[in-house]
């Protein structure tokens, strides 16, 4: 996050509704949530969606569904700048 990017702007960029973004108080800091994500914790849908199976800090299960475009971005981000 750049110095000029607010948490609400990040949420809007990532697809949050205006109401969700507005619920973030001014000056708030987004804290990273510790997640566990293991190998083979990804499901591929027939419609090219990707579902990543996660667990939170207390082991509670949840998932993140990505459309094709976001899955491509995630794959590129995980590969790093050299693409390896």
Image: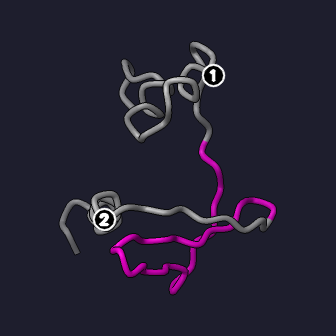
Left or right: 5 with respect to 59?
A: left
Q: Quadrant of residue 71?
A: bottom left
Q: Residue at x 36, y 18 (%)?
A: 4
Q: Residue at x 51, y 84 (%)?
A: 39
Q: Which residue is mark 1?
A: 23
Left or right: 16 with respect to 69?
A: right
Residue at disc 2, secondary structure: helix
Residue 22, given in percent of the width and then of the height, sits at 56, 19
Main secondary structure found in the magenta portion: loop
Using the image, determine if residue 60 lies above or below residue 17.
below
Q: Is residue 16 magenta?
A: no
Q: Quadrant of residue 25?
A: top right
Q: What coloring was used for the rendering?
A: one colour
Magenta residue span: 32-58
Residue toward you, 7 or 79: 7
Residue toward you, 54 or 81: 54
Mark 1 and mark 2: Cα distance apart in space: 28 Å
Q: Residue at x 42, y 62 (%)?
A: 66
Quarter holding the C terminus is bottom left
Number of marks: 2
Q: Is residue 49 magenta?
A: yes
Left or right: 17 with respect to 23?
A: left
Residue 64, given in percent of the width and then of the height, sits at 54, 62
Task: State the mark number for residue 68.
Answer: 2
Residue 70, given in percent of the width and then of the height, sits at 34, 57
């Amino acid at each position: 996050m750049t110095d000029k990017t607010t948490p609400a702007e990040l949420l809007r960029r990532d697809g949050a509704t205006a109401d969700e973004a507005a619920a973030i108080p001014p000056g708030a800091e987004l804290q990273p949530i510790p997640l566990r994500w293991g190998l083979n914790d990804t499901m591929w849908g027939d419609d090219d969606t990707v579902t990543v199976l996660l667990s939170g800090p207390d082991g509670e299960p949840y998932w993140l569904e990505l459309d094709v475009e976001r899955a491509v971005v995630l794959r590129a981000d995980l590969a790093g700048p050299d693409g390896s």
